[in-house]
Image: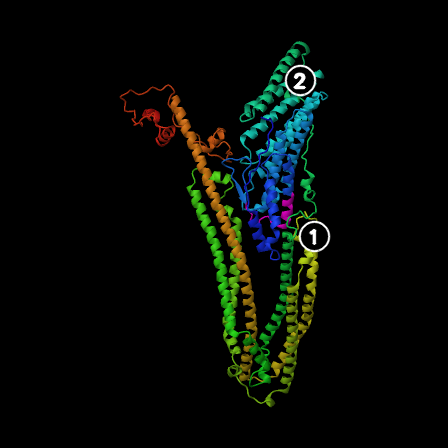
């Protein structure tokens, strides 16, 4: 057995690449057909088969690097989650470390890199170290393994953690401290190779060998320290014991080699001090950390112990009889400074994946628009539409509202219509009546109002179903925790399974925000409905035929000659100003329509795709890379805003003019109640026209909002359903884990009772399950990690003295139990075993012993 460790592979299962990729392309790339990428999908499956690890051969290094390079490229084409479920087992299996199953390509990449490091380490331990050349090869493998682990820790793990989010915890062996511990382990073993190489050659002095050995111990110490920061531990206890023993071993070797150098320098007292330190290191190593360690490692330490004992006896005798030098205290002995010969070597093909694939047509999915490009296009479209809505349509609505408020306050143009035409209806009102009827009138608008209300209820229903899924999961989770055995909740937490109120925080926060959005929308809908109910009657009059509408408007048949000529002059001036305001309103409406049409034909995709093609193929494309391009493209719409703003000053001047003229008109008119009633009726019908358009715009926007938002809510409901299924699956796995723990505990308890009964020893209550797993590494649950704050074991039962005496034969303390008849000699072994399995074995014991 080698005296160095190798990292085990994370075993994986086949994945459904074809189904996931085709489904993603079908739903997210309408411009492409999934069948166009059949070769790419097939090639991906082949690459994964050879690149995920599990087989130790030097040619698998290139296969793994090739698959990793394609994964880097794939993550520029796809988001991490395309619905492809990736399954990996833990590198260090135990009852506490479970299989990780997530939909995340970044997780696939991290596991591939971990297995590449494992492959390098296993190549190192598999190779011999009998010659200096072979030792150099082994050291190179370990340094390559350390380089992969360093690259994985710095370049991938932070992205993985944010990508997984609440879907699953990062497996313990992929946490940064765990990777750092493994990196230091690989460096320690590589440094050990250089120490061994130097020991085999005769031209190295003991002082140099001491410094090399000291650095080995430093790397092992760093590995131990990094591993200790992870709770529960990522590694089995045997690994920690190995690291600890190796650290003490090479601390001792360093002191031993330096003592030989001190001997040559005639520092006999210092020599004795170093030998004593070395003996203490070896003693600590063998006492504290030899359990579960390979025999070859222990033999190395014992061999050093013998050499130390012999040299210490000789040095002490010589110093006592000849040199008489004082032995300095350990604290005053000069420490040994290590000399590092190794580094974490990151392969150039790892740092630059293009060296593996190159810029050839061998790259996968070259014809597919990358996810980053799609995101950039979506960001631009969203930004453009919001800009038009806020900077063009928003200003237009504000200016139109300013005009409407003033006219409503001044009772215009109703007062002019009543003055100009004391009987009949104004032509402008007849045109607006026809326009409303052509749009469907009250029936069409009422249908839209009802539709928005229906869509709102439907959206609320979708969200309520999502809440129901979360509530049902929370109820199941509460029941699950309530039914757990003692310490079950602690085991679940250590396994990465948290209570629902913790695990579903992001989902509940998102659901609450959606609920707030719907509440705000419902409030807006109620305002629109109230507005419609308030003006529905007037709109109904406006939609009637001219004769019916005229009959509802008071008539003022006074002769024109009786009206003030000055009033007619003011009225004509106001009418002209109102026509100018209508012209400005129509110009703004045409500007808005032009902006919408321009947005409808606007396509930034060719430019984004062209610029993305100019970037390095291996760079992950992000929307921020096209910021200047998007700003430049948005500049095409500035002219629409400028056109709208040009009319603002002129409109303000006209509004002031209208208000002044209306004041003069009021002063010049006689107080005629019939005329005022006619003015009010005509003004009400004119306002009904504007309210109709306003409500129509509101419900149209509401319908679009609910349609779009329902799509988001459906996606959220699916997300909640998937999360609930994942939690259900995790609970099942946890129950299996707890059952295994219970069986292991029951087995240990039975064995303990049987052993105690056979030996006649007092029977004590078995240790607490978790405590037992920690105190007895050889037990079936030895790989369980120590809890953060384990409960104390129960107090042992009162034991009886070892020299107890049996009760008298006629004592009432005896119990009689019928034993089964002995098996027939002709019964088969299988029948005998079956009978023993179905018949409980019991021992007749006195009540005193039993109690």
Q: Are marks 2 and 1 in contact (CB under 8 Å)?
A: no
* 369 in relation to 220, above or below: below
Q: Quadrant of residue 274?
A: top right
Left or right relative to 831: residue 497: right
* 636 in relation to 317, above or below: below
Residue located beneath label 1 in the image:
613
C-alpha span from label 2 to label 1: 69 Å
User: Residue drawn at (66%, 47%), measured in percent from left and top?
Assistant: 363
Position of residue 8 measured from the top left corner of the image (x, y, whole percent): 57, 34
Q: In this view of the protein, can residue 765 be seen by the observer? A: no
Q: From this viewpoint, which residue is outermost toward the left? A: 810
Left or right relative to 730: residue 178: right
| Callout in the foreground (2, 1) | 1
The segment highlighted magenta reads 69-85
Q: From this viewpoint, which residue is outermost toward the right? A: 203
Left or right relative to 722: residue 839: left
Residue located beneath label 2 in the image:
271
- Colour scheme: rainbow
């Amino acid at each position: 057995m080698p005296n160095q460790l190798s990292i085990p592979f994370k075993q994986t299962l086949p994945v459904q690449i074809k189904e996931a990729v085709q489904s993603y392309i079908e739903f997210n790339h309408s411009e492409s057909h999934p069948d166009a990428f059949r070769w790419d999908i097939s090639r991906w499956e082949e690459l994964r088969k050879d690149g995920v690890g599990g087989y130790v051969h030097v040619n698998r290094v290139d296969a793994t690097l090739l698959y990793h390079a394609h994964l880097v490229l794939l993550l520029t084409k796809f988001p991490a989650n395309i619905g492809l479920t990736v399954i990996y087992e833990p590198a260090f299996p135990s009852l506490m470390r479970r299989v990780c199953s997530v939909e995340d390509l970044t997780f696939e990449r991290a596991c591939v890199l971990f297995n590449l490091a494992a492959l390098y380490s296993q190549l190192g331990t598999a190779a011999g170290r009998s010659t200096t050349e072979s030792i150099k090869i082994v050291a190179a493998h370990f340094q390559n393994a350390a380089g992969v682990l360093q690259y994985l820790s710095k370049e991938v793990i932070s992205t993985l953690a944010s990508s997984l989010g609440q879907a699953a915890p990062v497996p313990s062996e992929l946490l940064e401290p765990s990777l750092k511990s493994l990196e230091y382990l690989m460096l320690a073993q590589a440094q050990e190779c250089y120490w061994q190489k130097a020991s085999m050659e005769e031209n190295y002095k003991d002082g140099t060998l001491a410094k090399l050995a000291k650095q080995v111990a430093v790397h092992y110490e760093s590995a131990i320290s990094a591993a200790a920061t992870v709770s529960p531990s990522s590694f089995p206890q045997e690994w920690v014991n190995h690291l600890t023993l190796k650290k003490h071993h090479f601390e001792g070797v360093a002191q031993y080699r330096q003592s030989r150098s001190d001997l040559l320098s005639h520092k006999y007292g210092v020599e004795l001090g170093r030998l004593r330190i070395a003996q203490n290191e070896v003693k600590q190593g063998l006492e504290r950390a030899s359990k579960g360690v390979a025999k070859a490692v222990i033999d190395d330490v014992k061999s050093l112990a013998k050499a130390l004992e012999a040299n210490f006896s000789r040095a002490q005798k010589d110093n006592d009889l000849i040199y008489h030098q004082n032995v300095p205290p350990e604290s005053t002995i000069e420490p040994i400074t290590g000399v590092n010969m190794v580094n974490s070597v990151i392969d150039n093909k790892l740092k630059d994946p293009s060296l593996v694939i190159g810029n050839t047509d061998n790259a996968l999915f070259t014809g597919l628009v990358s996810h980053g490009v799609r995101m950039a296009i979506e960001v631009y479209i969203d930004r453009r539409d919001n800009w038009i809505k806020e900077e063009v349509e928003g200003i237009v609505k504000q200016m139109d509202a300013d005009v409407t408020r003033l006219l409503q306050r001044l009772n215009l143009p109703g007062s002019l219509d009543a003055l100009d035409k004391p009987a009949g209806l104004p032509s402008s009102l007849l045109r607006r009546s026809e326009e409303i009827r052509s749009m469907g009138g009250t029936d069409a608008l009422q249908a839209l109002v009802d539709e928005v209300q229906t869509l709102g209820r439907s959206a609320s229903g979708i969200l309520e179903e999502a809440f129901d899924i979360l509530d049902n999961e929370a109820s199941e989770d509460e029941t699950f925790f309530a039914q757990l055995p003692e310490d079950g909740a602690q085991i679940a937490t250590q396994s990465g399974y948290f209570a629902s109120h913790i695990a579903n925080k992001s989902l509940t926060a998102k659901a609450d925000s959606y609920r707030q959005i719907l509440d705000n929308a419902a409030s807006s809908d109620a305002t629109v409905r109230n507005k419609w109910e308030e003006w529905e009657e007037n709109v109904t009059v406006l939609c009637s035929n001219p004769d019916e509408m005229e009959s509802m408007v008071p008539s003022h048949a006074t002769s024109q000659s009786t009206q003030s000529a000055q009033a007619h002059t003011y009225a004509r001036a106001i009418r002209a100003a109102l026509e100018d305001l209508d012209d400005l309103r129509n110009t703004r409406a045409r500007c808005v329509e032009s902006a919408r049409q321009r947005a409808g034909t606007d396509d930034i995709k060719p430019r984004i795709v062209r610029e993305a093609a100019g970037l390095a193929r291996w760079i992950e494309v992000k929307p921020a890379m096209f910021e200047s391009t998007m700003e430049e493209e948005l500049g095409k719409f500035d002219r629409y805003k400028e056109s709208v703003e040009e009319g603002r000053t002129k409109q303000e001047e006209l509004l002031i003019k209208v208000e002044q003229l209306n004041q003069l008109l009021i002063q010049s008119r006689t107080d005629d109640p019939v005329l005022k009633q006619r003015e009010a009726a005509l003004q009400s019908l004119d306002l009904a026209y504007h309210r109709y358009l306003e409500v129509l715009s509101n419900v149209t926007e509401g319908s679009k909002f609910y349609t779009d938002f329902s799509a988001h809510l459906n996606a959220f409901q699916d997300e909640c359903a998937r999360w609930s299924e994942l939690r259900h699956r995790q609970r099942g796995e946890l129950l299996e884990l707890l059952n295994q723990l219970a069986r292991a505990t029951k087995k240990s308890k039975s064995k303990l009772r049987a052993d105690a009964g056979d030996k006649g020893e007092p029977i004590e209550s078995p240790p607490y399950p978790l405590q037992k797993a920690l105190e007895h590494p050889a037990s079936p649950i030895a790989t369980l990690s120590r809890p953060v704050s384990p409960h104390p074991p129960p107090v042992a039962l009162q034991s009886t003295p070892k020299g107890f005496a049996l009760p008298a034969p006629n004592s009432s303390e005896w119990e009689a139990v019928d034993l089964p008849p002995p098996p027939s000699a002709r019964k088969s072994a299988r029948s005998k075993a079956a009978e023993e399995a179905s018949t409980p074995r019991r021992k007749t014991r006195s009540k005193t012993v039993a109690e």
